[in-house]
Structures are given as C-alpha cells and as structure tokens.
Image: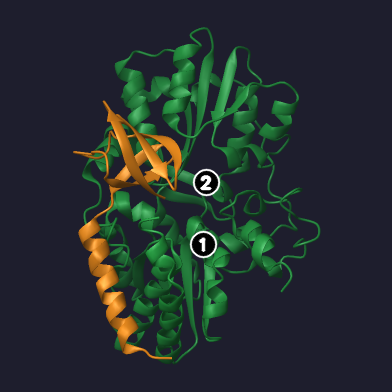
Amino acid sequence: MPAKIISVEGDMAEVSVGGTLFKAGLQMIEDAKPGDYILLHAGFAIQKISEEDANETMRLLNEMNDQINF
Amino acid sequence: MKYIDEYRDEVLIRKLAVRIRESAVQDLAFMEVCGGHTSAIHRFGIPSLLPGNISLISGPGCPVCVTGRDFIDKAVVLCRMENTILTTFGDLIRVPGSFSSLEKEKSEGADIRIVFSALEALDIARKNPGKNIVFLAIGFETTAPGTAVTVQQANMDKFNNFYILSAHKVMPPAMEAILNEGVKINGFICPGHVAAVTGSSIFDFIPDRYNLGCVITGFEPIDILQSIMMLVQQINNKTPQVEIQYNRAVTRSGNLIALEYLKRIFEPCDAYWRGIGIIKGSGLKLRKEFDRFDAGKLITSDIRSIEDDGSCICGEILRGMKRPDDCPLFPLVCTPDNPVGACMVSNEGACNTWYKYRKDE
C-alpha cells in the first residue's frame, strides 16, 4: 500500500497510510525523507513511488478520458 | 489519499470499461497471479464492468493458500516446544494442518504472537533472551527481502535465540508450471509488488516461450482496467510482451538493494506448493552460512503430514482450472468461519474473496 513518510530515525521511518501510522524499515531504499511516498509491505519500504511516472500515467489516462464521451 | 483517490475516479473507470468493451472482439481469459489482485478485482467489482467475453481467473499468488500442510505441521511442533514463542503473520494462524492449527494451539496455551514484520519478531527475541523465537517466513519476492534484512540483523547482532521457518517462494517457476500444465489463458495480470522488487524482466520468458502477454499491474481499479485494456491491445496487435502499467512503482531492473539482500541470505531450493506439488527452484532457503537461524533444525521428531481433503478443490483453483463456485463445499460447508481449504482462510484467497463479494450470485 502507498504510505507517506512522516519521520525518519536511522533506518526506520514512521509512515502514514491514510492517517494510520505504521513503522517501516528503510533498509531497502535510499535517500528516504519525510514527504516521500513508499510502498509499504510487511513492515518494510520495498520501493519509492515515482511521482513523475504516476503523473505520466494520469496524463495518458486523462487524454483517453477527453477522447471518450458518453 | 494520494496515489489512491485518483485511481478510483468513477468517470475514468467507466470510460476505461467502454474502451475495453469496444476493443475486445474475441473470448479472452486473463489470469491475475497475485492474491492482492484477486481481492482488489472482486472488492471493486471489476468483473461486472467487463464485457461477457472477458473472464478473469485467479492464480497461485496467495502465499497463505500455497503454503503446505507440512509447514503448518512443523509450526505446530515448534510452538509446542518449551520456552518457545512462535511469531507469524495473521492469516496463517487459521490454516488447518494435518493434526492441528496454530489457532487451536494458541487457544490451548501456546505462545503464538501475530506480528506485522519480521523485525517485530526480532524485537521479541531481543526482549526475551531466555526463549527461542521462531518467525514463520512465508511470502514471495515481496516479503522475502524483509526476512533477509532481519536475518542479516540477527547475524550482525549475534542472536542465538532467533530462528525462521522459511516457506518463501518465487513466482516465475509457478507461472511456468501452470502454463506447462495447459491452463487456458490469453495473458497475465502480473503481480505489481513482486515486480517492484524483482523488476519486470523476470516475466520475459512468458512472451518469449509461451507467446502470451504480461502486464505488471497496480492494485487500484483504474490500474486493473488499464492493464486489461493493455492486454487486449497486445492481443489485437499480435504483440505479446511484458509491459508495465504500474510504472509508479516498477522498473525493468527492480529494487537492486532488496535483490542483493535476497541473494546474500537465501539460495533457491525446490518447494512444495499446496495444490500444485513440488516445483523445482521455486523456494528460498537460508544459505549455509546462515543456517544456524533455520528453525527446521530444532525439529527432531518425524512429522507425518496428511494430504488435503479430497473434496476441497483449492488445488485446481490455484492452478486456474476451476473457480470457487465450482466447489461442492462452497459456500455452505466451507466458509471463512469454518474453512476447509487454505483458499478460504486468507483474505487474498480466491474462495474467501468470492465468499465475501460473490456468494449470492
């Protein structure tokens, strides 16, 4: 699930999933900082979420959205 | 919430459904490999948005479902040992073994604790130096790196009371086994979180050798519908390939740090998949230099595991051969409160998901 990093202490972070707080191990990702979004799985951040790629996906979807009219 | 709300936009969902309906001109069946996808597909009502000629079939990617009775039996033996605390992810506790379940053992006094991560289990070991702590390590490439981080930590800190019982598995050999058995599908909705770790390239053999498309998919309704559209387009264009829909989390090469942890701590082994059998090279076991953390070494007695009940069709469901509503036990005999098979236990299991969302159809 996507989680927002609230704070970082060593290789652990406090992250928020829709307002619920969890601990996340940061051993598998680099340069994590508060405000970043990560994928949280079984207590670990397994990947950073790329805002740039997410925006590109939404741009393509919105293009399609504009092409189809009900 | 960011990365969730925008992928649940109702108008966009309806338009994607229209686009799929316009594009799909033949009968098509796609397998969602991941249990997380099975759950999301039914929770969001995706089948009701698809045209009648597209069907979705659940695959073997629910870790609890494919964990064998023998693993539960070993866990039961371990939790009965003196001075032992067994730690596990929640779902596993209710899976029936050959002669007991962890839930039953807990009700009879065994010290079994639900944990959210392997590091929590290590913390319990730190706080209980006089006891042996066993962590039940199940899950695919998504979960195994976390176990690897924890074993490395236990090794560095010279723990002598922390053990894991590994049933970690890797996905590609199971997908290959199912294809070799002849499952009738036209493409794979590939697991997004497995691929976030491994990268998309682990699925290259599927278009190369089986001429089937693979789209690595996120877990929101727009992710799933967009992936189905991409698979339909691959079929229409006759261009089976590995594509990444879930590009906000998945790259071609994956998470290299997580992969390095996996390689350092584990090595491949043959593994038993409930309902499928032994699949060569599909498991992960501790490398020799870390095998002092292997909980299996604590077991000295012979354990005779029994086969699954013949009337339960979990195996055929996990292989994509049957659906939960094909099972004579569904939905009256086998229920989430009284599960016969593992597919009814886990929240990611096909039977559990169908029971929650589709039992009245």
Residue found at x 62% / y 25%: B112
Give residue B44's position: percent from left, percent from top: 54, 67
Q: Secondary structure at mark 1?
A: helix
Write down the colour of chain A. Answer: orange
Q: Is residue B201 left or right of residue B177?
A: left
Q: Is residue B334 left or right of residue B168?
A: right
The residue lying toward the viewer, choosing from B212 and B217, is B217
Q: In the rendered image, which quarter contains the C terminus of chain A?
A: bottom left
Amino acid type of the residue tagged 1 in the rendering: Ala
The chain letter under disc 1 is B
Can marks 2 and 1 be said to lie on one chain? yes
Q: Position of residue B244 (x, y in %)?
A: 29, 66
Q: Name which residue lies at 63% across and 54% down.
A: B343
- Residue at the farthest top position: B130
Q: Is residue B189 visible?
A: no
State the residue position of label 2: B272
Residue at which label 1 appears? B40
SS class, disc 2: strand
Q: With A36 as the anchor, is B145 left or right in this view?
A: right
Q: Colour of chain B?
A: green
In-image side of B141 versus B273 (left or right)? left
Outermost residue to the right: B332
Badge 2 vs badge 1, beta-carbon distance below 8 Å: no
- Seen in the picture, residue B188 relative to B259 is either above or below; the reply is below
